[in-house]
Amino acid sequence: MMSYKSRLIRAAFPWLLLAGCHSVERGSDLFDVHCSDCHTLDHPNLKKQPPKLNGVFQSKTLPSGAPATDEQVRNVIVHGLGTMPAFDGRLSEDDVNEIIKYLHTLK
């Protein structure tokens, strides 16, 4: 079943699908499965909320204060940071790259 976000991406960027580029869609699906529960929903039982990632690459820095670069985001995904778990071994390098590509589309 395609997520609401995936449907929006398809509607907003149909040229990506026509060009045979499915990485944004795949990245969206991976984000929905592995990231969205923490980064899109509110968690009233947590003292500190995970950051929302809309526009994460529109800023010069990440919520942690680190530079907003692909490499820094990759490092956080793979190794974790604070209460965020590491996804090393759970996501392939290609999966991480697809999620990063998707994060670049978030405004």
Image (cartoon, helix red, strand yellow):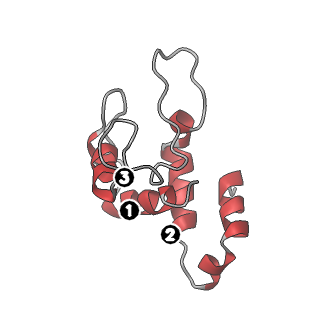
Residue wearing tag 1? 97
Residue 7: numbered disc: none
Tell me the amino acid under the disc marked 2: Ser
Tell me the amino acid under the disc marked 3: Leu
- Report whether 82 appears left or right of 95: left
Residue wearing tag 2? 23
Residue wearing tag 3? 91
Residue 86 image-quadrant placement: top left
The residue carrying pointer 3 sits among few (fewer than 14), some (14 to 19) or many (20 or more) residues within 10 Å by Cα, namely some
Kindly report which numbered mark, 2 or 3, lies closer to the viewer in this rendering.
Answer: 2
Answer with mark 2 or mark 1, whichever residue precedes in sequence. 2
Residue depicted at x 32% and y 38%: 65
The location of residue 99, given as percent across then percent down, is: 45, 57
Residue depicted at x 36% and y 64%: 94
The location of residue 19, given as percent across then percent down, is: 58, 85
- Res. 103 visible in picture: yes
Report the quarter where the C terminus lies. bottom right
> Where is 95 relative to 59, above or below?
below
- Res. 3 visible in picture: no
The residue closer to the viewer here, 22 or 63, is 63
Element at badge 1? helix
Residue depicted at x 36% and y 45%: 61
Distance CA(mark 1)–CA(mark 3): 10 Å
Answer with mark 2 or mark 3, whichever residue precedes in sequence. 2
Q: Are marks 2 and 1 in contact (CB under 8 Å)?
A: yes
> Where is 76 relative to 97, above or below?
above
